[in-house]
Amino acid sequence: MAELQEVHITEEKPLLPGQTPEAAKEAELAARILLDQGQTHSVETPYGSVTFTVYGTPKPKRPAIFTYHDVGLNYKTCFKPLFDYGDMQEIIKNFVRVHVEAPGMEEGAPVFPLGYQYPSLDQLADMIPAILQYLNFSTIIGIGVGAGAYILSRFALLNPDVVEGLVLINIDCNAKGWMDWAAHKEELSGHSELVQQYRDIIMHAPNLENIELFWNSYNNRRDLNFERRGDTTLKCPVMLVVGDQAPYEDAVVECNSKLDPTKTSFLKMADSGGQPQLTQPGKLTEAFKYFVQGMGYMASSCMTRLSRSRTASLTSRASIDSGRSRTTSQSSESGIVPSGSPGHTMEVSS
Ligand code: BEZ
């Protein structure tokens, strides 16, 4: 299990004889990162301390894969099945991974004292620069689920030069009004399996009080105000992901309609329930490979299995559509486009 390692950014280390401050900083960063095979760190931010776990070694000129989990989960319960998936290894070996946890969601986190003011989602997004500064990373590819997808989107709106790509699972870019809340409740009542799944996760969570605080922040989020043709938009390639018939489907479809269609792909997964990264890690891995390749980070030699799947007989499928062509809930049956570029329809094998 990863160990919590408290490190303060302001920490002062004595210089070795003849060592310049720059060389000392570089050596410290290199040592810190070499140790980072699943080590957990905390940094202080204006909104409190934030914890994150780092896997892999940084590759020069490559972004870090940076994840943010959903409410009720932590980085392991949200992402481990995806990052442990066999085919995922050939992708992630090329990247350092940074898995952030919302305050109080870490394993063994103490319950916040009564009256503690939990950060808003905007403030959670504002904590991210301290992490990147600590690790000396200049760009990321973000993968976020639910609240995590919202937080990464907010961060990307404010820091467009830092975010090279975003995979947004179950994103809802609107503020939650009481009408939506009622509608969502009704929708959920038709998804008893999903409700049960969440109930199980949450009922067994040791830090229920903390989860409730994060949940309240999520429910008090502001509208992201995406404008398809305006300045308030995501400038990087985006892959929107949702399980078909999941309660978030309409929200993700709406988000798709508000983003730049030349940069946005929409992946709707069959048979995946409410958390596609948990239930369909294979499909998501395949789509992620295309996405990363579309950004120029995967050699085509890595794509052999994907190319084979183009002609495979598909019984369980997902579709990727551009925002331009689709806002409905149909699945398309056309072939794979191995560029990960938006504006096409793609199927991936299960
Ligand atoms: C990773 O390799 O990035 C990873 C490992 C365990 C859990 C989540 C991610």
Image (cartoon, rainbow, N blue to C red):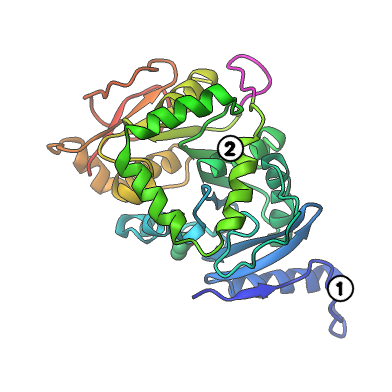
Direction from residue 23 to residue 61 in the image, left or right: left
State whether residue 192 is above or below residue 90.
above
Which kind of residue does numbered mark 2 sit on?
Tyr
In front: 28, or 218? 218
Q: Is residue 28 visible?
A: yes
What element does badge 1 sit on? loop
Q: Is residue 259 visible?
A: no
In front: 41, or 94? 41
Circle 2 Cα neighbour tier, 10 Å, few/some/many (<14 / 14–19 / ≥20): many
State whether residue 319 is above or below residue 42.
above
State whether residue 193 is above or below residue 238.
below
What element does badge 2 sit on? helix
Q: Main secondary structure of the magenta part?
A: loop
Residue 204 is marked as: none
Separation of disc 1 and disc 2 at Cα?
41 Å
Quadrant of the snapshot with the C terminus: top left
Residue 177 place in picture, x, y as percent: 59, 25
Residue 187 place in picture, x, y as percent: 39, 29
**Closer to the eye: label 1 or 2:** 2
Mark 1 and mark 2 lie on one chain; the one further toward the N terminus is: 1
Direction from residue 237 to residue 9 in the image, left or right: right
Which kind of residue does numbered mark 1 sit on?
Thr
Span of residues in magenta: 225-233
Can you tell me whether the CB of the residue at mark 1 lies under 8 Å from the nearest atom of ligand 1?
no
Residue 150 is marked as: 2
Q: Residue at x 22, y 41 (%)?
A: 349
Circle 1 Cα neighbour tier, 10 Å, few/some/many (<14 / 14–19 / ≥20): few
Direction from residue 328 to residue 151 in the image, left or right: right
Residue 20 is marked as: 1
Residue 301 place in picture, x, y as percent: 32, 49
Snapshot quadrant of residue 230: top right
